[in-house]
Image (cartoon, rainbow, N blue to C red):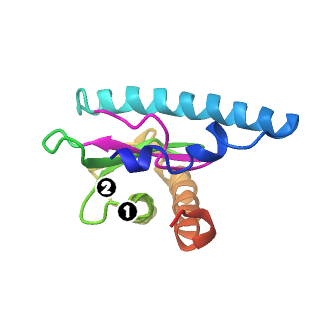
Amino acid sequence: MERYNCLLAVRSKFGRIMPADEASEAAEEEVWCQDQRDRICDYIRRQGLGQARIGDWPAWHVFPYVALWAVESLTRTGSVGWWAISGDLPTDYVTCSGGRHPRDGVRDIARRWQQVADDWTNGRESADITIGATEDRLTLAPMLSSRAQMLLDWTADDTLWSS
């Protein structure tokens, strides 16, 4: 889990002297990331994952739109058990299965959202997710679908991912 805590931290926390406007943006990014972490911590507790540890810094993020967090497994200390997402989109989490890279987590969440949006559009229930009121699903489905597509586009863009 530790290697994902710092993927993007180097740019904003260490290194070269930054011009004032860049330093201001870095400070805003720090505050935003902390706010998103607080949001995820509250969400994870409400979801019943108890005292699962969450990375100090997003495993991946695009400030100020989305942050993906590594959540430690409750059974395998030091391993990612879940990926949790927050930002200008629904807060959600998925089990970290197979791949241990944040890109896999974003892709899994996006595919799940696509399926849920399709279910709602076609009048089917989707028992594994709750977003808004049941009567709003036809309105929420296109928004969820567009967020899912945005995430899938970002997973396909190699420039957004560290090697």
Q: CA distance from mark 1 to mark 2?
A: 19 Å
The amino acid pointed to by label 2 is Glu
Disc 1 versus disc 2: nearer the observer = 1
Q: Residue at 66% x, 40% y: name it.
A: 12
Residue farthest left in this picture: 75
Q: In the rendered image, which quarter is residue 25 located in?
A: top right
Image coordinates of residue 148 in percent, x first then y, are 51, 61
Q: In the rendered image, which quarter is residue 34 located in?
A: top right
Residue matched to label 1? 108
Whether residue 73 sits left or right of residue 1 in the image: it is: left
Q: Secondary structure at mark 1?
A: helix
**Which span is picked out in magenta?**
53-72
Alpha-carbon neighbours of circle 2 within 10 Å: few (<14), some, or many (≥20)?
few
Whether residue 70 appears in magenta in the rendering, the answer is: yes
Residue matched to label 2? 125
The amino acid pointed to by label 1 is Asp
In this orientation, which residue lies closer to the viewer: 28 or 115? 28
In this orientation, which residue lies closer to the viewer: 160 or 118? 160
